[in-house]
Image (cartoon, rainbow, N blue to C red):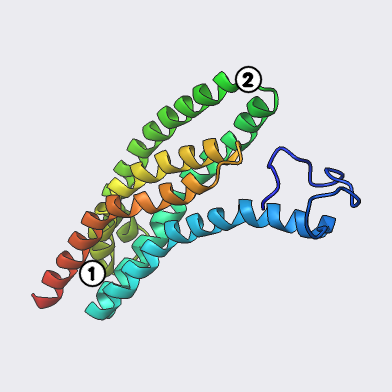
Amino acid sequence: MLPAMEEPLVGGRSDTEETGGPKESLVVTEVKKQLYLAGPLIAGCLLQNVVQMISVMFVGHLGELALSSASIATSFANVTGFSLMAGMASSLDTLCGQAFGAKRYHQLGIYKQRAILVLTLVSVVVAVLWAYTGQILLLFGQDPEIAMGAGSYIRWMIPALFAYGLLQCHVRFLQTQSIVLPVMASAGSLHPARAPGQGSQRRRFTTSSAS
């Protein structure tokens, strides 16, 4: 049976406490708590990141040009978009954590709503930047065919950008309350938002390769 999450990791129970069964050491108790919290979070992170890896693997079957374009687009999206969203949403770790610890539960929702508003506005700016990715890469001397392919690929990732910002706010909001199972489910719900764009990307590259 997993220990209560409100119970402190150190000094929560005495080694001589009667539990009606075999006594567990303090180390085993702490490991169970850590696994209970970390397991769903690890699965959630894998679900968030596996989509791009699988997409690039599929695009690799279309040829070297498509693979190069998709790789550059993915790297550009991670640096200018997804990393930015995750970094800005990480402020909720501190704000929501403080509010939850102080039992100011109404502040949790306020912080989350403000973060969603800010990240949505930032996503609009980043989406405009992504729309001109091809021209930006050309400006830095990238091969024209690769630059145009990367620009086409990243434009279909724009819907995922908005979903990713909302997801990060939701994850931080729940994580600070030690609610981790919905985090894994929320990460999985991001996949349908990306699916139409990923399918369109592959069809676009297939058409380009055929021509």
The residue sitting at 43% across, 31% down in the picture is 116
Q: Quadrant of residue 21?
A: bottom right
**Mark 2 neighbour class, 10 Å CA radius: few under 14, some 14 to 19, many 20 or more:** few
Tell me if I can see residue 81 in this picture. no
User: Considering only vertical position in the picture, is 194 above or below 60?
Assistant: above
Q: Secondary structure at mark 1?
A: helix
The residue sitting at 83% across, 55% down in the picture is 26
Q: Position of residue 38 (x, y in %)?
A: 61, 55
Given residues 41 and 142, the one toward you in this image is 41
Tell me if I can see residue 97 in this picture. yes
Residue that badge 1 annotates: 145
**Mark 1 neighbour class, 10 Å CA radius: few under 14, some 14 to 19, many 20 or more:** some
Amino acid residing under circle 2: Arg
Of the two numbered discs 1 and 2 on the same chain, state the one appearing first in sequence: 2
Residue farthest toward the left in the current orientation of the protein: 211
Apparent side of residue 19 relative to residue 193 in the rendered image (left or right): right
The residue sitting at 67% across, 51% down in the picture is 2
The residue sitting at 33% across, 74% down in the picture is 57
Q: Position of residue 88 (x, y in %)?
A: 52, 39
Contact between marks 1 and 2 (CB within 8 A): the answer is no
Amino acid residing under circle 1: Glu
Residue farthest toward the right in the current orientation of the protein: 16
Apparent side of residue 190 relative to residue 184 in the rendered image (left or right): left
User: Considering only vertical position in the picture, is 204 above or below 170?
Assistant: below
Q: Position of residue 114 (x, y in %)?
A: 47, 25
The C terminus: image quadrant: bottom left
Residue that badge 2 annotates: 104
- Marks 1 and 2 sit apart, C-alpha to C-alpha, by 54 Å
